[in-house]
Image (cartoon, grey):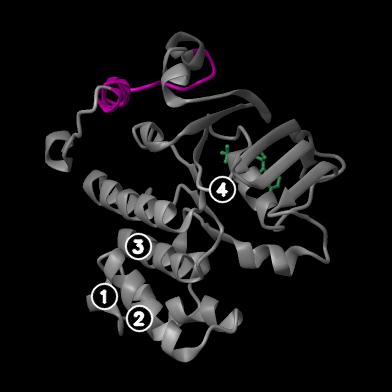
Amino acid sequence: MREKLVEFKNVSFRYGEEQPWVLKDCSFEIYQNEAAAIIGHNGSGKSTIAKLMNGLLFPQEGEIIINGRQLTQESIWEIRKDVGMVFQNPDNQFVGTTVQDDVAFGMENRGIERDEMVKRIDNTLKAVSMDSYRLTEPHKLSGGQKQRVAIASVLAIFPQVLILDEATAMLDPRGRRDIMKTVTNVQEERNLSLITITHDLQEVVQAERVIVMNNGEIWDEAVPREIFAKKAELREIGLDIPFIATLSDELRHAGVTITNEALS
Ligand code: ADP
């Protein structure tokens, strides 16, 4: 059986005592080497779930267990070693004066040896097609390039759980597909749990399991095909499944690989 890397047990969360509950009794599990997608209308609680997974927030009710450790104020530093997270706005994540310094930063914090660091900087920047920008200052990059570097920085720390929260939103469709392919390859090679929070429902086709959020509750959890079959109900909760996503899913089941060119 695959190991459980993320476990939410009856988690409820609100941003303050006077505030409404934004997550209500949420329970789900994510396994090692599993690619899961979290979808839902704006404000349904997706980013809040991401922030709870590495202790940026703490639940008022319920329990969160990451790689066998319960999330507490004491355990967050250990938990953050296992969880890599990329948010939509990469500007908040840059700390280095050059792209390569930035990728090095997370590794320095984890005490990774210099030779290994150099190797990982090389490999991850190549993987996201940013190796020719090593010495560029991050603020001079475009939004999409910043997102590529932010993803490289997280891949370089070899997390066990990788969370991408709208992390490719600034890339064009082709760039997004290329990056997701890279990330999926890394996920399979290293047996990661990959959690993608996305508005791009075509990206959802790549997931083994889809968690659908609605108003802070888990509305459904199933393989993409079962979720896509509920098109009408999904529309009622503000989610439109585009034809291309259903088609990609059907073709994938039929064993047809669609090239990037065909989809562009
Ligand atoms: P999603 O990622 O699905 O768009 P979020 O998790 O960002 O949803 O937000 C869930 C709810 O929590 C929304 O109603 C949002 O307005 C509220 N919220 C998010 N961040 C804060 C915050 N810092 N303070 C108060 N309310 C917040």
- Pointers 3 and 4 in contact (CB under 8 A)? no
User: Circle 2 is placed at which residue position?
Assistant: 137
Q: Nearer the viewer, residue 75 or 187?
A: 187
Mark 2 vs mark 1: which is more N-terminal?
1
Closer to viewer: mark 2 or mark 4: 4
Label 3 secondary element:
helix
Q: Nearer the viewer, mark 1 or mark 4?
A: 4
Q: Which mark is residue 88?
A: none
- Residue type beneath disc 3: Arg
Badge 1 density bin: few <14, some 14–19, many ≥20, Cα 10 Å: some
Label disc, if present, on residue 32 of the rendered structure: 4
- Segment tinted magenta in the rendering: 236-253
Q: Give the mark count.
A: 4
Q: Quadrant of residue 247?
A: top left
Q: What residue is rendered at 38% in x and 54% in y?
A: 183
Residue linked to disc 1 = 131
In the picture, the disc for residue 148 is 3
Name the mark nearer the viewer: 2 or 1. Answer: 1
Which SS class for mark 4? loop
State the separation of the CA atoms marked 2 and 4.
35 Å
Quote the CA–CA distance across marks 3 and 4. 24 Å
Q: Can residue 40 be seen in the rendering of this structure?
A: no
